[in-house]
Amino acid sequence: MHIVVCTKHTPDTEAKMSVDEAGNVSWGESPLIINPWDEYAVEEALLLREEYGGTVTVISMGPEEALEALKHAIAMGCDEAIRIWDDACADSDTLSTSYVLAKAIEKIGDVDLVLFGKSAIDTQTGQIGPAVARRLGIPALMYTIKIADLDPDGKSITVERLLEEGRQVVTAPLPAAVGTTKGINEPRYTSFIGIRKAARMKYPHWTLADIGAEEDKVGASGAAVRWPQVMPPPAREGEAEIIEAETVEEAAAILVEKLLAEKVI
Ligand SMILES: Cc1cc2nc3c(=O)[nH]c(=O)nc-3n(C[C@H](O)[C@H](O)[C@H](O)COP(=O)(O)OP(=O)(O)OC[C@H]3O[C@@H](n4cnc5c(N)ncnc54)[C@H](O)[C@@H]3O)c2cc1C
């Protein structure tokens, strides 16, 4: 079994986002972490490897910072990690990101399963999984809450998908793309040995030429959507009055009088 997990680096969930006058979005000095939803995908890949054997390769399209996500996945126990990047990949949207990831997976070659997190916590479209599956021409089993059956020799997989009304059981041929959801497992912590391995490991860097991708289909050139302009909201104008009184009842009575005077009630 060869399982590929797609992962992305995101700002820490504690990060304070800000927007400057020019519309530049920043999360300050906040550390970058593996997209938290991807830990479920990594854990599921490791559980499947424990049961069926094989290799887990984790991939990310991104600049140097993407190594944070790859290192975390290696520290959890993945075997290989590949970063794909070229300056032309800057300003990718989901269309162009899925193209690059699909080309990288094609280059890896003998892949049985491609796993994704539910979505990325920053831009959060949830489009990458289905888009990569579409490009590879393989089934997309998104919102999977359970892998009920896997038959690597018979090349089939049965999953339970989480829907608003309940669960849907789907059987599909391998290779397939599976989007994991919270609850599918309990992601393990990184181990000390894993962290050391991740720190020492060499992370191959594939360029567009390495994966045979065409430059006009990646980054801003291949994007269908332009990144929307972001502006800080206009400063609020208004006054606040703190009602001071001896007791809560007195304060409430004053508040009622003021609301009546303003014709709010
Ligand atoms: C500097 C910058 C510029 C951008 N410019 C634009 C722009 O011009 N137009 C626009 O529409 N969007 C832009 N984006 C957003 C970009 O489209 C998304 O970050 C990207 O396509 C992934 O989509 P998502 O975050 O919604 O992932 P989702 O679809 O929510 O993620 C689903 C799964 O796919 C994985 N995944 C997502 N991205 C990657 C990746 N790169 N490598 C491996 N796995 C991945 C996730 O980790 C998750 O497991 C920009 C982002 C950045 C950081």
Image (spheres, grey):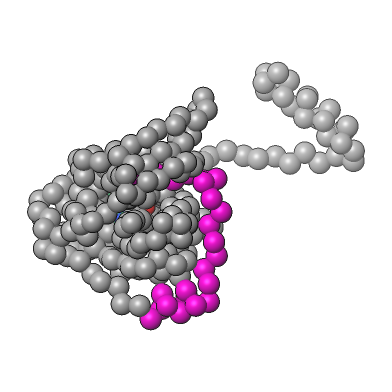
**Which part of the image, by quadrant, shows the N terminus?**
bottom left
At 87% from the left edge and 33% from the top edge, which residue is drawn?
A: 250
Q: Is residue 230 left or right of residue 196?
A: left
Is residue 30 located in the magenta-colored stretch of the structure?
no
Q: Is residue 231 visible?
A: no
What percent of the width, then of the height, locates residue 213? Answer: 12, 55
What percent of the width, then of the height, locates residue 8? Answer: 36, 57
Q: Give 34 or 75, whichever is nearer the viewer.
A: 75
Q: Is residue 60 left or right of residue 163?
A: left
Q: Give the magenta part as a residue range.
A: 176-200
Residue 215 higher or lower than 240, as above or below: below
At 41% from the left edge and 49% from the top edge, which residue is drawn?
A: 117
Q: Give 216 or 162, whichever is nearer the viewer.
A: 162
At 43% from the left edge and 38% from the top edge, which residue is drawn?
A: 159
Residue 119 higher or lower than 68, as above or below: above
Residue 201 figure quarter:
bottom left
What percent of the width, then of the height, locates residue 233? Answer: 43, 43
At 62% from the left edge and 39% from the top edge, which residue is drawn?
A: 239
Residue 61 figure quarter:
bottom left
Q: Is residue 243 left or right of residue 112?
A: right
Residue 136 figure quarter:
top left
